[in-house]
Every structure is written in C-alpha cells, then in structure tokens.
Image: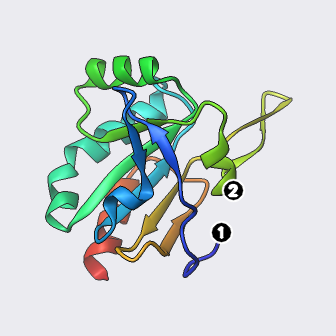
C-alpha cells in the first residue's frame, strides 16, 4: 500500500452482524485501524483513546473503524466492557488485513506466527489512502492521527 493509491474495498460484519463496506462512507474520511486482539492491553488503550476523541473525529467528517480477526461476539463483549463508541469490524479470515498488507510474520518470545501488525490508514473522502502509520505505538497515536486530519 502506498499513499495516493485507492484503498482496497472491503465488506465485513460489525458487532450486530450487519455488513459494513468501505463504500458506505463515501464523501467522508475514514481512520481505518488494524489491531491484533480484543481485550489486550495495547488494543484496549487504543480503542478507548479513539472512543474518547470520537467527537473530534466526527466534527472533521471522519469515521473511525477498527478491524481485527476477532469474532463479532468478541467485539460485542469488548465494546460493552469498555463502553466503546467506535465501529469495530470482524475479519476472522484476515482477508481485509491481507489486502492492506498488515497480516504479516511476527516474532514473540522466539516463536514466529502470522498476525496483525498494528497499523492505521487515513482514507480521504474520495477513497484514496492519504496517510499510513505502520508498527504503531499506542501512546499518543490517536493525537497524531487527529492532528494529521486537522493539518490537511
């Protein structure tokens, strides 16, 4: 993926099982962030940070969408447990993650496995990628994303 390219189209279920597509947000910017797993420390912090700043994103005509391989049931519990207001989509077969290039070989404690590399894509209202953050560190990430939108 490169800045300026058309964002890969996708359709995935939200917590209620409703199909959500990239095209549903035409004319709005989208913050599309990929995260490894519901209810883990970094992922929880990131989701809460996006929720806490959601009104600011909405004021800038921007939809925030999180995607992970977790099930819609897991997303529902995660949303309820932390009172999340952002949209979370389920990608259990990691097809969307693969199309965005974030399903990669990872290493942890000497073991290699395939998983999500925490990444965020800013998609402009015409459907093109305007910014990419890879190997995201959660601390201050939401501030960085929000400032990028304000600056454009």
Q: Quadrant of residue 37?
A: top right
**Could you tell me if residue 117 is visible in this image?**
no
Residue 106: x percent and y percent?
77, 40
Say whether disc 1 or disc 2 marks the residue closer to the N-terminus: 1
Please state the total of marks drawn on the protein image: 2
Q: Mark 2 points at which residue?
A: 101
Q: In which quarter of the image is residue 72?
A: top left
Element type at mark 1: loop
**Quarter placement of the C terminus:** bottom left
From the viewer's perspective, tell me whether residue 49 is left or right of residue 38: left
**Quarter placement of the N terminus:** bottom right
Q: Which residue occupies the foreground of this view, 118 or 72?
A: 72
From the viewer's perspective, tell me whether residue 56 is left or right of residue 22: left
Q: Mark 1 points at which residue?
A: 1
Q: Do the residues labelled 1 and 2 touch (CB within 8 Å)?
A: yes
Q: Quadrant of residue 61?
A: bottom left
Query: In this figure, which colouring scheme has been used for the structure?
Result: rainbow
Identify whether 93 is placed above or below 104: above
């Amino acid at each position: 993926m490169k800045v300026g390219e058309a964002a890969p189209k996708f359709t995935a279920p939200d917590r209620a099982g409703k199909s959500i597509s990239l095209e549903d947000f035409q004319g709005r910017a989208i913050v599309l962030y990929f995260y490894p797993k519901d209810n883990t420390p970094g992922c929880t912090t990131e989701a809460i940070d996006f929720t806490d700043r959601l009104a600011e994103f909405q004021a800038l005509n921007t939809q925030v969408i999180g995607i992970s391989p977790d099930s819609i049931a897991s997303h529902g519990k995660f949303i309820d447990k932390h009172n999340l207001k952002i949209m979370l989509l389920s990608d259990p077969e990691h097809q969307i993650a693969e199309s965005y290039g974030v399903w990669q070989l990872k290493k942890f404690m000497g073991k290699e496995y395939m998983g999500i590399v925490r990444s965020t894509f800013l998609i402009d209202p015409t459907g093109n990628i305007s910014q990419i953050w890879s190997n995201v560190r959660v601390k201050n990430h939401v501030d960085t994303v929000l400032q990028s939108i304000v600056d454009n």
